[in-house]
Image: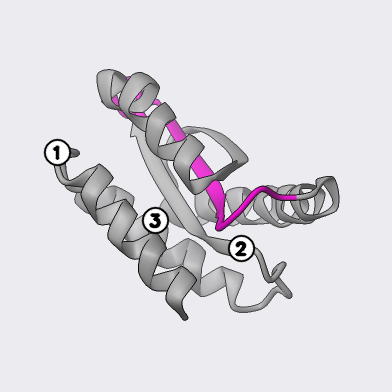
C-alpha cells in the first residue's frame, strides 16, 4: 500500500507540467483497461499509457510496471498487448499505426517528456 501511494505521489509530481490526455487517448485507455480484466496480469503490472502521436497517425499503448520487470513479465504483456491492439484497431476503426511496448514508470515518464510530448 505504501509503494502504491509513493508511486502515485511521484507520478503526480513528475507529470504536473504534462498536458492532460486527449479525449481519444482517454477513451482508448478505458477500452484497454476493460479488455485487460479478461487477462491474468503480472503482479508487477501498474497500468497502461496511451499516446497518440505524429498528427494522429500512430497510437502507442505502453504497459507500465511498478518496478524493474523480468523478461517473462515483458513477454506476457507483449502477447496480451498484441491481442488488445488488434481489438482497439477494430473497435475504434481508426487508421492508426498501432504500436506497443513495456516500460518502468520512471523510464516512461522520462521518455514521455523527451519523445512523446514533442510529437503530440
The alpha-carbon separation of the residues under discs 3 and 1 comes to: 22 Å
Q: Is residue 101 above or below residue 68?
A: above
> Which mark is on residue 116?
none
Of the image marks 3 and 1, the number of the one nearer the N terminus: 1
Q: Residue drawn at (61%, 63%), measured in percent from left and top?
A: 45
Residue 45's disc is 2
Give coordinates of residue 47: x percent, y percent. 50, 61
Badge 3 density bin: few <14, some 14–19, many ≥20, Cα 10 Å: many
Q: Can residue 85 be seen in this view?
A: yes
Left or right, 117 with respect to 80, comes to: left
Q: How far apart are marks 2 and 3 (CA)?
A: 18 Å
- Residue labelled with disc 1: 17
Relative depth, front residue between 105 and 21: 105
Query: Residue at image x 41%, y 46%?
Result: 50
Q: Give the range drawn in magenta.
A: 53-69
Q: What element carries label 1?
A: loop
Amino acid at each position: 500500500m505504501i509503494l502504491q501511494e509513493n508511486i502515485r505521489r511521484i507520478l503526480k509530481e513528475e507529470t504536473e507540467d504534462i498536458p492532460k490526455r486527449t479525449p481519444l487517448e482517454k477513451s482508448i485507455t478505458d477500452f484497454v483497461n476493460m479488455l485487460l480484466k479478461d487477462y491474468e496480469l503480472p503482479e508487477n503490472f501498474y497500468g497502461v499509457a496511451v499516446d497518440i502521436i505524429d498528427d494522429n497517425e500512430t497510437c502507442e499503448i505502453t504497459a507500465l510496471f511498478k518496478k524493474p520487470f523480468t523478461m517473462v513479465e515483458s513477454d506476457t504483456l507483449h502477447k496480451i498487448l498484441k491481442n488488445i491492439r488488434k481489438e482497439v484497431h477494430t473497435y475504434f476503426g481508426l487508421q492508426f499505426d498501432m504500436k506497443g511496448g513495456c516500460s518502468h514508470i520512471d523510464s516512461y515518464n522520462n521518455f514521455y517528456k523527451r519523445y512523446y510530448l514533442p510529437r503530440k
